[in-house]
Image: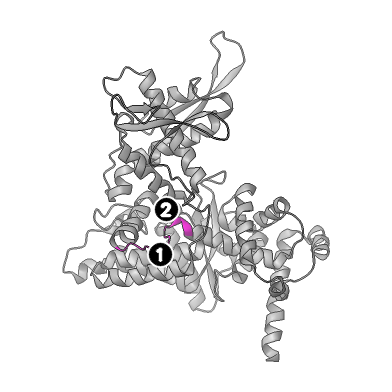
Amino acid sequence: MPFEDLKIDVKSVFTPEGSESAKDSCVFLYGNNDINWFATDYLMSDSVPEGSKNVTKGMIRYFLEYLNNYENWQHGTALVKPVPMGEVTDKHLFNFVGYIEDDIGLNRNGIVRRVKSALSLLEFIQNTYNLDYKLISISSNNEYIEKGLTNAKWLINQFTGKRYLHHECLPDIEDYPSRNPITEEAIESLYDDLDKLAESGQELKHEMLTALIGLLEKTGIRVSEAANIDEHTIELLRLQLTSWLNGTPIDLTELAKAAKLTIDKKSLKAAEAIYRRSKISKGSHDLVWIPIKTTKGKKKNKIRLIPIPVASAQYLVRFYDDYIVNELDRVRAGEHKINRKKHKKLFIQPETHAPMTGVMLSSLFYDVFSRQYKSAKHKRSPHLFRHRFITCLVLQQLKSLNSKFGGQQLASLILKRIQGLTGHASIATMLHYVELAEAEIQDPDEKSEDIAFDDETREVLIEKYGEDEVAIIEYEIIKKRTENREQRK
């Protein structure tokens, strides 16, 4: 059963008395129409307070997705072999922590909440169903009468005095800084390890991971979004690159028509201006656009256009042509072609030759950069590139705005400006990136050259021309100022 086949149907169910009042019911339903009754019964039980049901629903779904894709994540196999709910062990919970960090890079609190939800579900199953074995054993004094597949213990929260379930997999200290970006040194270490991978003769893995890292670094997309890139996306990049080489870049309106998208051209031009001025572009004057299907949040399944440097786009197209269409690695090794292009996907599993999911891409990354070439100094995971991308955009906006107003208002303004690039919809998430970016600004005097006008002027201009137009004006002013400064040298 593939990753995408796990879904949740939420229905309204009338009360037994037949009244018109209804309550939310959540059915954890697989693509083959099987229902996970363990999870469904748990969520609808009194074990989950009414006010917590919506949050718990997401937590349990995430745990089910993990179990559904355990083999893919661990071994990169194409065969999906879900871990049955009744066979969850301590090892699965320890690996769950690693999976969470690989997938979404949460801090300790985020990890703890997800693991505790899983433990509570296992406890409910043990207490509710007539099992002939011990699924979970819970100790109150570190002694177990009978060991279970999973073993937890009751602890007392020193602040609230309430009892909670604890498992040894939970980190005791904050080893997981929330949304901290990958460092420049860590990125350099990845490329050093890629050189070693090439020297070892693993040509396809080397080229694929080089393409993936470049893509994540320049676009900040999620790994699951990278896995969705298909032949159509590559051909749109090729179309733009051909026009660029001919000296006639494609207009955004033409691109939208070719991609069958409805766009707000002014918003995209504003996003392009922000991207160009950020650290991400590194002075890349020539950009094209890559359409990305958002895979999470309120904007799920919506297509967003993201700028990408021409050089990065060329690498993606070359990788697709050389290794997916022409299979150069197999030709050079004297092996027969296996028709990788039949799947019409950019990323194909090196061993099984099946289309890769986001989980499989993360697993490949983990296998190479955490097992084969482990770094003791650097924190390296695919999702950290997304944190870096967003932090760089926010940092550029902080310097540009030079704003005196507070966190919530500032986060709202920045989110409005960059959400088209990131696929975000949460002010709470953006607040953290604002804090990270503020910490990087060491000397306030260094910001003066990046300021187009003060807050009062900006407010008047936004009221008159709109947010997107003002972002473009800011970019043009800074660009002109830089050009004049260069001419005077």
Q: Quadrant of residue 168?
A: top left
| Residue 386, percent from left and from top | 50, 58
The residue nearer to you, when weighing 306 against 377, is 377
How is the structure coloured here?
Answer: one colour
Query: Mark 1 Cα within 10 Å, few/some/many (few <14, many 20+)?
Result: few
| Residue 475, percent from left and from top | 69, 71
Establish if 195 lies above or below 468. below
Q: Quadrant of residue 448?
A: bottom right
Residue at x-position 72% and y-position 69%: 474
The residue nearer to you, when weighing 196 against 424, is 196
Frontmost of labels 2 and 1 is 1
Which amino acid lies under the numbered mark 1 shown in the image of this protein? Answer: Lys
Q: Which residue is mark 1?
A: 377
> Is 298 included in the stretch rendered in magenta?
no
Establish if 184 lies above or below 176. below
Residue at x-position 46% and y-position 74%: 311
N-terminal of the pair, mark 2 or mark 1, is 2
Q: Secondary structure at mark 2?
A: loop
| Residue 286, percent from left and from top | 54, 75
Asked whether residue 117 is in view, the answer is yes
Q: Which residues are magenta?
A: 373-384
Residue at x-position 42% and y-position 53%: 228
| Residue 48, percent from left and from top | 51, 25
Q: Which residue is mark 2?
A: 228
Q: How many marks?
A: 2
The residue nearer to you, when weighing 266 against 462, is 462
Left or right of residue 452, residue 137 in this image: left
| SS majority, magenta | loop
The quadrant in which the N terminus is found is: top left
The alpha-carbon separation of the residues under discs 2 and 1 comes to 32 Å
Which amino acid lies under the numbered mark 2 shown in the image of this protein? Answer: Asn
